Image (tube, rainbow, N blue to C red):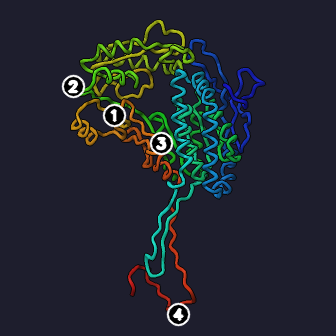
Amino acid sequence: MANAHLSTQRTPPRVPNLIGGKFVESKSLSFIDVINPVATQEVVSQLPLTTDEEFKAAVAAAKKAFPAWRNTPITKRQRVMLKFQELIRRDMDKLALNVTTEQGKTLKDAQGDVFRGLEVVEHACGMATLQMGEYASNVSRGIDTFSIREPLGVCAGICPFNFPVMIPLWMFPIAVTCGNTFILKPSEKDPGASIMLAELAMEAGLPEGVLNIVHGTHDVVNAICDHEDIKAISFVGSNVAGMHIYARAAAKGKRVQSNMGAKNHAVVMPDASADDTINALVAAGFGAAGQRESKLVERAKSLKVNAGTEPDADLGPVISKQAKERIHKLIQSGFDSGARLVLDGRSPQYESGNFIGPTILADVTADMECYKEEILAQFFFSWRYGNGATIFTKSGVAARKFQTEIEAGQVGINVPIPVPLPFFSFTGNKASFAGDLNFYGKAGVNFYTQIKTITQQWKDSASAEKINLAMPTSQKS
């Protein structure tokens, strides 16, 4: 893991906490191995289960940094983000290599992970206009009313393993540019990218205590949900964890945005371009293409499965042995429930490492476990989730009917992965999202700020009017 703040006195090195602007080695006696998911299963580093004292110190550091940071002019906060995006560009290859080493995706895919996160940082560089309030003059005689957006205080983010750069960058750049301070908990499976991003953020000028990093599993997640000084929580991950966090944190009065399971469906109309559609489906992660199934299988078979660092690799390994075993069971359960296994990626050639080849299940029904569960592999099939859906067609009438009637938060028309750029918001719905304000865009700014409304009256001299105890209105009595 190419970053300077790993403890190099130990082999393997240990991932530090970031508390109050300093990378510090945890005093925890419990650690989790961070494993390279290729055939070697090399232990890249060891991640501590941050102690309760260390967690409380991180929150205290964030709380201490908040008053000065909230009063820092928005233009200066934006300049920190401008420098931050420049440094991410400078170190893009290092970040991508770390993602490939810890998470397994190919270098090309890892660079896409970094770039989609970078786009959010670029969006944060011009967020001042999204934080503007509203003003109404003379709402009553001599009285003006205006509203302003203010930061919440200490916020927190809990990240998944599948996008170790992009998801942290969905969270803390928006939060801190709005004037908040932040506690980041990366995935315990691939924390290195978050440490590298924190190094770059501080190099860009982010003050001590504005960004803090803690590590762990259930205990630290529950501590984040329960701590009274944390005002808002952002989460991306599984439905079970997401609903637990949403319920527990909301019960403590916190704001929560929880992005969860994501099945992304594709509808292929008879008039769709065969080659363009199949290429899009394969690029997006395969899909059910009906009568064009044989071409889809042919394209899927041509994909090369290898270590992500290999230049010819199309698909890298999944994150862990446990993930591989779970995916194997879901494939088998689909087959046992009556689905056709058109292409089986559980090949003996992938026994070493956490590799799974392209897999296609057809004739899948909505009651099958493989349909209901999010899988996170190179695996799709021919909807309690509402993350995204796409239609491939040449008909404007069909496309308009689809976009109007489909119950999904993000709709693609001849676009395989309809994820919006950051000046819009990531708008999953149904079982894919819990909360009422989505990630990034205007909704992200609204999530990390609260409205204060001020009503003011200025008089030239002392009024001779008598005291009126009635509720003030715009009507003259």
> Who comes first in sequence, dot 1 or dot 4?
1
- Badge 2 is on which residue? 270
Q: Closer to the N terminus: mark 4 or mark 2?
A: 2
Picture layout, residue 467 above or below residue 18? below
Q: Could you tell me how far apart the alpha carbons at marks 1 and 2 are, in whole angstroms?
A: 17 Å
Q: Sequence-wise, which precedes: disc 1 or disc 2?
A: 2
Dot 3: what SS? loop
In this figure, which residue is indicated by the disc labeled 3? 422
Coordinates of residue 392 in the picture (x, y in percent):
29, 29
Q: In screen coordinates, is 26 left or right of 467?
A: right
Give the spatial CA distance, label 4 vs label 3. 55 Å
Taking the image as shown, residue 106 lies to the left or right of residue 366, namely right
Residue 428 falls in image quadrant: top left
Q: Quick one: label 4 or label 3, which is nearer the N terminus?
A: 3
| Rendered location of residue 386, percent (x, y) | 35, 37
Q: Which mark is residue 389?
A: 1
| Circles 1 and 2 in contact, beta carbons < 8 Å | no
> Which quadrant is the C terminus positioned in?
bottom left
Q: Nearer the viewer, mark 1 or mark 2?
A: 2
Mark-to-mark CA distance, 4 and 2 = 80 Å
Residue 464 tag number? 4
Amino acid residing under circle 1: Ala
Question: In which quadrant will I find the N terminus?
Answer: top right
Q: Nearer the viewer, mark 4 or mark 3?
A: 3
Secondary structure at badge 4 equals loop
